[in-house]
Image (spheres, rainbow, N blue to C red):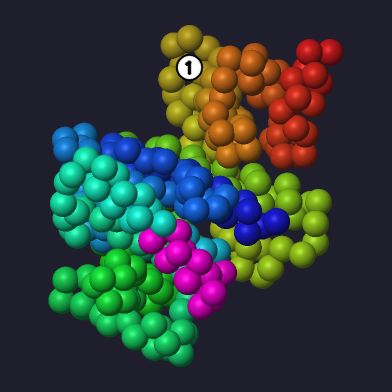
Amino acid sequence: MTRFIHDQFAKQYLTELLTPYGQVETSKDITAEVRQIDVVFIPSPQPTQSLETLGILGQMVTNYAIFEPFRNAVTKSEIRSCMGKLFDIHGDIERQSNRNNNRINEAELPRLWIFSPTASAELLGSFNTTVDEENWGKGIYFLGEGLKTVIIAIHQLPNTPETLFLRILGKGKVQRQAVEELEALANNSPFLADIIQLVHNLIAVLSARQRQEHDIDKDDQELIMKLSEMYQEQLEALKKQGLQEGLQEGLQEGRQEGVERERRAMVESIMQVRFGQVDSQLETIINPLIAMNREEFTPLLLQLSREELLARFAE
């Protein structure tokens, strides 16, 4: 179950990061059979932000790209499955090109980027991967050019600002350190506010799951502790901000507004993870939810279906 949680987080995380730069589609169906690609990215001719902001991830999205993030170490079978989906996409593009009497430009075909928290030398060697440290650095393994596939071994990436957005999708100590770096960076980068909220939302989901199940692994338990600490720090900062803003209009009112903003952002984020979007019906139950404390509303959002949530608050 925690794998599903992280899959959803990875999709939202990449969508939030990449939307300013082009078209993003998650869980894209492909026609060969009922299979889905996690994230499809088509670059915009005029992105609203500089790709340099994303570091190595920015290099990956200069062209049509497919992303498949894995919570646990990717297997050979999973790599082959991802490549099968890639080739199905290539086939669709080629058929469309033939119908339009256009010639395929290899550079326009999407490249597959597989994110794995770890990858063994044996696995990488079995696909005859190569590295290009001069242009890409360590931890990024290319299959043959015609295969249009790259494996990112996140645990091998250097701890640099250029790899930060990739290391967030790692595991264990690698991910925890990246979260700390992202939190520090966000102080001077307003555009990261939504990304930070997604990371904070992850703690709510994992914490509730930990209370329901007792099989969360050590890495996720440690991540919960780290995110809990950061969440409390941000909440305290919001409270202080609310107090300062409310000095002229009333201390208590300012404090409450800061807390409500944080709760609203968390509720909306969890709804997006579970239901895809926050429509007009779901908006009607946000205020009743944020009137509750986090320990009360998080299990409701995770356990109840959309219909059950609406019915509960309709009563």
- Label 1: how many residues lie within 10 Å, few (<14), some (14-19) or many (20+)? some
Q: Nearer the viewer, residue 122 or 246?
A: 122
**Which residue is pictured at 58% across the width and 15% down the height?**
280
Determine if residue 240 is in view.
Answer: yes
**Which residue is pictured at 31% across the width and 70% down the height?**
147
Q: Position of residue 97 (x, y in %)?
A: 24, 46
Q: Position of residue 198 (x, y in %)?
A: 50, 43
Q: Nearer the viewer, residue 39 or 312?
A: 39
For the N terminus, the image quarter is bottom right
Q: Nearer the viewer, residue 239 or 247?
A: 239
Determine if residue 53 is in view.
Answer: no
Dominant secondary structure (helix, strand or loop) of the stretch shown in magenta? helix
Q: Is residue 76 magenta?
A: yes
Instruction: Tell me which amino acid carries mark 1.
Output: Gly
**Which residue is pictured at 16% across the width and 55% down the height?**
105
**Bounds of the magenta segment:** 72-87
Q: Residue furthest top?
A: 249
Q: Is residue 230 magenta?
A: no
Label 1 sits on a secondary structure element that is loop
Q: Position of residue 101 (x, y in %)?
A: 18, 44
Quadrant location of residue 154? bottom left
**Which residue is pictured at 29% across the width and 44% down the height?**
96
Say which residue label 1 marks: 246
